[in-house]
Amino acid sequence: KAGVTQTPRYLIKTRGQQVTLSCSPISGHRSVSWYQQTPGQGLQFLFEYFSETQRNKGNFPGRFSGRQFSNSRSEMNVSTLELGDSALYLCASSLRPSLNTEAFFGQGTRLTVV
Amino acid sequence: AQSVTQLGSHVSVSEGALVLLRCNYSSSVPPYLFWYVQYPNQGLQLLLKYTSAATLVKGINGFEAEFKKSETSFHLTKPSAHMSDAAEYFCAVSEASGNKLVFGAGTILRVKS
């Protein structure tokens, strides 16, 4: 079965612009989480969605937002981009938001802000 | 809040040698622990997970990890390293509030021929 699909794979944006990243979870998975990966800060949790509701949010400014659609697909948006937002953004899907449920990761979207 | 510490940002071993990647966790409740591997320009792939069923957990590609509550550790081992094991490895703990993982800083494994 198809894995987690993230689009686009690579993106270059200018400071001040906004960007939208997309994540299609594995079929049947209803929980989607987003992570930011940078060399300096490592992997940091952004937010988690289940059944179109945000369940958890990490410690990121309000410029970072997300949503989940009825088909479980999720998007994250970053407004007023800063150079420090350059990172690999990873999406993970799982059947449900449970402690021991395996999370399957997509290949990520590499965002470069210039 | 839970946290994870991975000792050693870089580990280098010879092909065929033992691989040992260290992970210590901080958790006030019984933890759910995971090891993930990341190859260059790829996402994360689950190697194994501890969910309290057994303290010795076997994963994919010959890796295993032992949960030691007294040492709050969950070290990853593989008896014999292969060149294809060269990658970055992340230890993670699942937060009590759901599908949220807290990751360690990662360990880059280099395998020398």
Image (spheres, rainbow, N blue to C red):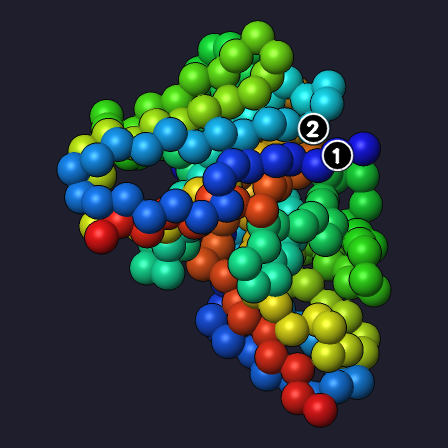
Query: In the image, is residue B77 above or below residue A71?
Result: below
The residue that appears at 75% across and 34% down in the rendered structure is A2
Residue A70 in the image, given as x and y percentages of width and height? 57, 8
Q: Residue beneath label 1, please?
A: A2
The residue that appears at 47% across and 11% down in the rendered structure is A53
Which of the chains bears the disc numbered 1?
A
Characterize the local packing of mark 2: few (<14), some (14-19) or many (20 or more) Cα atoms within 10 angstroms.
Answer: many
In this rendering, would B85 be left or right of A10? right
The residue that appears at 54% across and 58% down in the rendered structure is B41
Characterize the local packing of mark 1: few (<14), some (14-19) or many (20 or more) Cα atoms within 10 angstroms.
Answer: few
In this rendering, would A86 be left or right of B8? left
Residue B80 in the image, given as x and y percentages of width and height? 80, 78
Residue B92 in the image, given as x and y percentages of width and height? 56, 48
Query: In the image, is residue A13 above or below residue A50?
Result: below
Which of the chains bears the disc numbered 2?
A
In this rendering, would B51 be left or right of A38? right
Q: Nearer the viewer, residue B17 or A13?
A: A13
